[in-house]
Each structure stands twice: as C-alpha cells, then as structure tokens.
Image (spheres, rainbow, N blue to C red):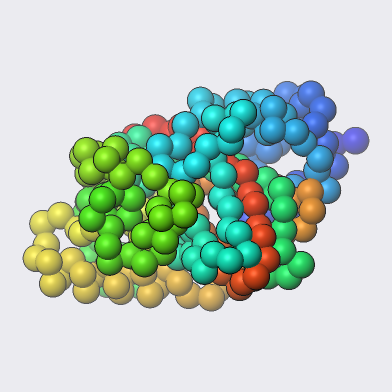
C-alpha cells in the first residue's frame, strides 16, 4: 500500500504507512521528499529504529554533518545527543532558532529521534517560514527584499557566550563544548528572504538565535527591523506543536522552519538523538 501524507495542523505533515527500519522503496522516498519540500517538516510515529538505521535513513537525504558542539554518541559519532537530566535547569534548543544558519552552506535538515521521554511535557514547536513570508505586510516585505544578514555561532557556542545562561550551563555540564572551534568561525552572510532550493517557495531566513544584524543598516535600524520580523514570524497562525511519544521521529527542513524545544519537564530525563544533513549555499 502507498504511504499516506496527512497534514499536521498548521505546520508539517505526518507520514503514515512506512517502517523506517526496513529498506525503503524509491517510490516511498520520492513521496517523502515531496512532502518534506512542501511542508517543511515531516513526522513519523510508532517507529523502532536502531542508531545505525537512523544513520542509514539520514544518508538517503545527503551527507551527514558531524556536529562540532554537541556531545556525540559514544559509538556513533554521526549522532548528536540532545539530553536534559532531571537535575539540569536548562535544555538545549529552548529558544526559536533554525539549526546551522551559522554555516556558509546551512544544513538541509535535522532528523530527531525520541529515545527517552518525560511522562509529560517536552514538546517541540515548529513555525513555518513559508507561511511567515506569504503573510508579510507589503511594507515589511519591501524593507527586507534583497537584504542580507550576518549569522554567527560564536555568541552561543564560543568562549564569550556569557550573556546566555543556558549556553553556560550546558557547557559546564558537558552537553555543549568545543568553544575554541566556535571562536574561529567566520560569520556567513545569507539572504533575509530565500528561494527554497527544493520547493522553489520563498521563505524568511533569519532567526533570533543566530542572526546578528542586517547588512547596510545601522545597528539601531537593523535591530528594529529584525525585531519586527521576529514578532511577525512568531505569530500563532504560523506555529504548531509536535507532541512526542515513544517511537516518534521529526525531520525538519532548516531552510523552511524555526523550532523551539519546550523546557517544561523539570525533574525528569529527556534524551533525543539528532542527525543533521549537509545543505547547500542559499540564494
């Protein structure tokens, strides 16, 4: 039977009728690629895959990015660990962002597998940057079309990330490291509005975590324009929460979405395994 693609509220789609632990037919992969490009994030339920099968699935989409800052799996370095222990106050990803916008060729996507979940809480919110672009007021759209913005990892992962309490905490407890590598990174410049390389749709491509400023504007004007863009992109009609359960997998497109991990399960453990897929330069 063919797989079923079902919309997931305002953002994303659930892909039903597929077992990712089995070899995947090319027709099914083609359908998944089309859903991924169209919806920006796809979700799978009731899966039971090993770490190696996680890696095998990721390789259908492109080369794997070995994360420079997250703790790696002890056996499978392709897998980055996203963990919060019961006694830890801050989670990883607890703010609106898109992964790897600080790279010159930003990541295509990230595949997150639930390995251990709290009894409640720990959902992930997703926001569609396709929808955000489509709803831009004409005045705001005219202000950002043709603009470029500088992105960086240094203020989050570098040695001077002191203003970010969560970053400091995750470094002290060993979940985030390699600050020296972040310090040496050059800051890439990306268009504020991109044409998505798979779907051809237009999307907003700035985010509150990694975008520093818009080129060609004063610091004050850049900050004001970014704050206006962020407020627009956070509108509830562009968002949907994904509620994790055992066997859940999310695969999001970093060029088409933002995401936010809720930190609402204090006193409980949450372990997720993430693989990030290399992307291409954006235009």
Residue 103: % across, % down: 33, 39
Answer above or below: position of 115 versus 54. Answer: below
Query: Which residue corresponds to the image point at 33% horizontal and 69% vertical from the top-left?
Result: 229
Query: Which residue corresponds to the image point at 46% horizontal and 49% vertical from the top-left?
Result: 174
Q: Quick check: can you spot residue 10?
A: no
Quarter of the figure with residue 218: bottom left
Image-based side of 243 in relation to 213, left or right: right
Image-based side of 14 in relation to 162, left or right: right
Query: Which residue corresponds to the image point at 42% horizontal and 68% vertical from the top-left?
Result: 233
Closer-to-camera residue (259/230): 259
Closer-to-camera residue (205/184): 184
| Quadrant of the image containing the N terminus | top right
Image-based side of 244 in relation to 90, left or right: right
Answer above or below: position of 1 versus 166. Answer: above
Residue 194: % across, % down: 36, 48
Q: Quick check: can you spot residue 213?
A: yes
Closer-to-camera residue (40/258): 258
Answer above or below: position of 72 versus 133. Answer: above
Closer-to-camera residue (145/254): 254
Q: Residue furthest right?
A: 1
| Quadrant of the image containing the C terminus | top left
């Amino acid at each position: 039977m063919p797989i079923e693609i079902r919309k997931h509220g305002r953002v994303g789609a659930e892909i039903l009728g597929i077992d990712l632990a089995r070899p995947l037919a090319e027709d099914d992969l083609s359908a998944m690629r089309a859903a991924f490009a169209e919806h920006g994030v796809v979700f799978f339920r009731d899966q039971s895959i090993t770490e190696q099968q996680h890696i095998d699935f990721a390789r259908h989409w492109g080369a794997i990015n070995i994360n420079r800052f997250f703790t790696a799996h002890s056996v499978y370095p392709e897998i980055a660990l996203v963990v919060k222990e019961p006694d830890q106050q801050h989670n990883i990803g607890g703010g609106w962002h898109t992964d790897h916008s600080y790279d010159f060729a930003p990541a295509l996507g990230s595949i997150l597998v639930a390995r251990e979940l709290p009894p409640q809480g720990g959902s992930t919110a997703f926001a569609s940057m396709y929808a955000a672009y489509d709803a831009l007021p004409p005045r705001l759209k005219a202000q950002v079309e043709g603009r470029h913005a500088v992105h960086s990892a240094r203020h989050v992962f570098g040695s001077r990330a002191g203003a970010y309490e969560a970053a400091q905490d995750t470094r002290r407890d060993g979940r985030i490291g390699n600050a020296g590598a972040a310090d040496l990174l050059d800051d890439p410049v990306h268009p504020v509005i991109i044409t998505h390389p798979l779907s051809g749709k237009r999307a907003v491509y700035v985010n509150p975590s990694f975008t520093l400023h818009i080129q060609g504007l004063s610091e004050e004007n850049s900050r004001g324009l970014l704050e206006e863009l962020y407020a627009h992109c956070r509108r509830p009609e562009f968002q949907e929460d994904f509620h994790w359960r055992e066997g859940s997998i999310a695969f999001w497109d970093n060029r088409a979405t933002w995401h936010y991990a809720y930190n609402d399960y204090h006193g409980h453990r949450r372990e997720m395994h993430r693989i990030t897929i290399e992307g291409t330069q954006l235009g």
